[in-house]
């Protein structure tokens, strides 16, 4: 009894509510409308069909196919800036070219490591949070970690202006190639840079929507990263986050680091892993609020076993600088 009272005394009201939801399933809200999510996926998949070879604008079909196929499975650490003595410690997917998301180009089809996640995750965001397909029209979207362009092309298909970044140069180059091939260069800009390099005035107050699926848990400093995303938004802008995480009611993270791997082998350079902090929904919420976001909502998506988050920048807010890795950040 004494331990229970101490826990109640030391917990915030939000933490108490999360604990109750974990212990009594009836207290859990219905997080997602599966029927609506499927309908949204179908609509997004239909729009993504704009990126088939019959719609190429600046390159022929054969040359397009040859270029893409020439990049698949190429191993190249030098172009990423790694020295020979660093290669053993780098992420497999940074060294060897892996296609990101499924893409039926019409003349040929590529299976990506992430399957149809570019479609399904965006549909889930719209089913979970107050955002619709129309909310992307004529908006500037900051696409974080674009890989081989699946999310970037999809966002452009929603009539957004897209600024995409990707720290792996070979993937940024492929995304830029696809966007140019389909005549999107006037609406899409791709940069081969790390999110941490976006802590400059060039990126401040630039986006209406930050789209960041599958990235936060790959970052060694998620609070700093979230502050950079906060600063990139205009007043009234929103952030959409999705991450591997842990289904726990408390604000906890599981640390893995760069030496814990999932499926795959070193010989094939196809291992999963290289995850830093995997947050619970409550932990992600706290990190987002520390970064300045308001109206924050985080949920555990039981279907995918992932954490989803939504927040808004209602205006500029300061950040606690004690212990901050970059104390000069705005």
Image (cartoon, rainbow, N blue to C red):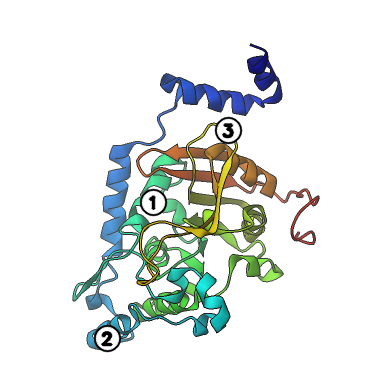
Circles 1 and 2, Cβ within 8 Å, touching? The answer is no
**Residue holding disc 1:** 121
Q: Is residue 267 left or right of residue 276?
A: left
Q: Nearer the viewer, residue 39 or 327?
A: 327
Q: Residues within 10 Å of mark 3 (few under 14, many from 20)?
A: many
Residue topped by disc 3: 250
The vertical placement of 142 against 10, above or below, is below
Taking the spot 49% from the left edge, 81% from the top edge, the residue there is 77
Q: CA distance from mark 3 to mark 1?
A: 24 Å
- Name which residue lies at 43% across and 69% down: 93
- Under tag 2, what secondary structure? helix
Q: To which quarter of the image does residue 324 belong?
A: bottom right
Nearest the eye: 229 or 170: 170
How packed mark 1 is, by other alpha carbons closer than 10 Å (few <14, some 14-19, many 20 or more), is: many
**Front: mark 2 or 3:** 3
Is residue 296 visible in the rendered image? The answer is yes
Residue drawn at point x = 39 percent, y = 75 percent: 97
* Residue that badge 2 annotates: 66
Q: Secondary structure at mark 1?
A: helix
Q: Say whether residue 67 is left or right of residue 296.
A: left
């Amino acid at each position: 009894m004494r331990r229970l009272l101490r826990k109640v005394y030391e917990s915030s009201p939000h933490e108490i509510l999360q604990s109750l939801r974990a212990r009594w399933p009836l207290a859990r809200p219905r997080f997602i409308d599966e029927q609506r999510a499927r309908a949204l996926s179908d609509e997004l998949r239909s729009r993504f069909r704009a990126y088939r070879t019959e719609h190429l604008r600046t390159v022929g079909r054969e040359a397009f196919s040859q270029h893409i196929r020439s990049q698949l499975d190429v191993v190249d650490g030098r172009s990423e800036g790694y020295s020979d003595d660093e290669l053993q410690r780098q992420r497999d997917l940074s060294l060897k070219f892996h296609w990101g998301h499924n893409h039926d180009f019409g003349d040929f089809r590529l299976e990506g490591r992430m399957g149809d996640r570019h479609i399904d995750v965006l549909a889930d965001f719209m089913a979970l949070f107050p955002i619709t397909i129309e909310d992307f029209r004529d908006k500037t979207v900051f696409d974080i970690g674009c890989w081989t362009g699946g999310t970037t092309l999809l966002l452009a298909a929603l009539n957004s202006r897209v600024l995409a970044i990707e720290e792996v140069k070979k993937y940024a180059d492929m995304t830029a190639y696809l966007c140019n091939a389909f005549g999107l260069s006037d609406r899409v800009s791709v940069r081969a840079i790390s999110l941490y390099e976006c802590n400059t005035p060039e990126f401040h107050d630039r986006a209406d929507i930050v789209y960041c699926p599958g990235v936060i848990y790959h970052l060694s400093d998620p609070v700093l990263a979230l502050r950079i995303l906060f600063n990139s938004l205009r007043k009234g802008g929103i952030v959409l986050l999705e991450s591997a995480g842990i289904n726990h009611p408390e604000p906890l993270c599981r640390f893995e680091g760069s030496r814990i791997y999932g499926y795959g082998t070193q010989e094939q350079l196809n291992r999963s892993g290289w995850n830093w902090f995997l947050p619970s929904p409550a932990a992600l919420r706290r990190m987002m609020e520390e970064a300045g976001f308001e109206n924050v909502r985080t949920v555990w998506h039981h279907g995918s076993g992932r954490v989803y988050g939504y927040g808004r920048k209602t205006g500029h807010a300061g950040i606690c600088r004690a212990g901050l890795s970059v104390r000069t950040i705005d």
